[in-house]
Amino acid sequence: MEKIVKSDEEWRQELTPEAYRVTRQHGTERPFTEHHFAKGPGTFHCVACGQPLFDAATKYESGSGWPSFWSPIDGVGGEAVEEDVDRSHGMTRTEVHCARCEAHLGHVFPDGPKPTGLRYCINGAALSFDQEDEAARGA
C-alpha cells in the first residue's frame, strides 16, 4: 500500500478543525457524536485519505458512545488499519490508525462480540460514511 504523506499545514487545510485534532493530534471526540448513529449498509472511510476502513455490517452498539466495529476491512494491498502501543493518559492501550495515512482513529479493546472478540472503538470525526444505495444492492 502506498503511504500518503503530507505536511502538517496540508492536513490543517484539508480537514475540519475537529478531524485534524482527532486524526493528526491523537485527540478523542465527545461520545455520542458523529457517525455514532449511522445505520444501514455501507462503508466507513478514513476522513483524511478516503481509505475504506470498516464495513457497516461489522458495526454494533457497544454502549461506549463511539462507533464500534468487531473487525476492520482489508485495505488495498493489506489491512486497512495498523496498531501501535499507546501509553498516554497513565494506561497502556492499543491505538488504531489508518494504514495509508497514519490518521489516528481510536483504540481496539479485547471486549467485543463474536466472531473476533474485539471492539474497535473509533472516533466518528475520523470517519466518513458512504451509505450503500438500496437500488445498488438489488433491494
Image (spheres, rainbow, N blue to C red):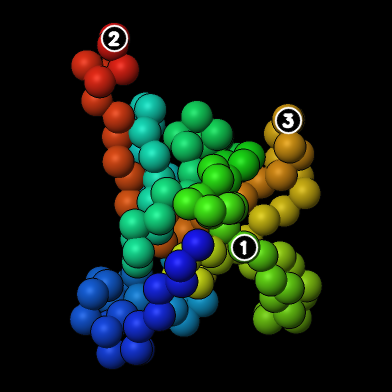
Residue name at image x 68 percent, y 80 percent:
89
Q: Write down the quadrant of residue 49 in the picture.
A: bottom left
Classed neighbour count for the residue bearing mark 1: other residues with Cα under 10 Å, few (<14), some (14–19), many (≥20): some
Q: Nearer the viewer, mark 3 or mark 1?
A: 1
Classed neighbour count for the residue bearing mark 3: other residues with Cα under 10 Å, few (<14), some (14–19), many (≥20): few
Q: Residue 90, relative to residue 63: is it above or below?
A: below
Q: Residue 96, relative to residue 27: is it above or below?
A: above
With 68 as the anchor, is 35 left or right in this view?
A: left
Q: Residue 70, relative to residue 48: is it above or below?
A: above
Query: Which circle marks residue 91 in the picture?
Result: none
Residue name at image x 23 percent, y 75 percent:
14
Q: Is residue 18 visible?
A: yes
Do residues under tags 1 and 2 come within 8 Å of each other at their CB atoms? no
Residue 20 image offset from top left, x and y in percent: 35, 76
Residue identifier under label 3: 115
The three-letter amino acid code for the residue at tag 2 is Ala
The three-letter amino acid code for the residue at tag 3 is Pro
Residue identifier under label 1: 82
Residue 37 image offset from top left, x and y in percent: 39, 39
With 89 as the anchor, is 42 left or right in this view?
A: left
Residue 7 image offset from top left, x and y in percent: 34, 89
Distance in Å between CA atoms under marks 2 and 3: 27 Å
Residue identifier under label 2: 139
Q: Secondary structure at mark 3?
A: loop
Q: Secondary structure at mark 2?
A: loop
Residue 70 image offset from top left, x and y in percent: 63, 40
Do residues under tags 2 and 3 come within 8 Å of each other at their CB atoms? no
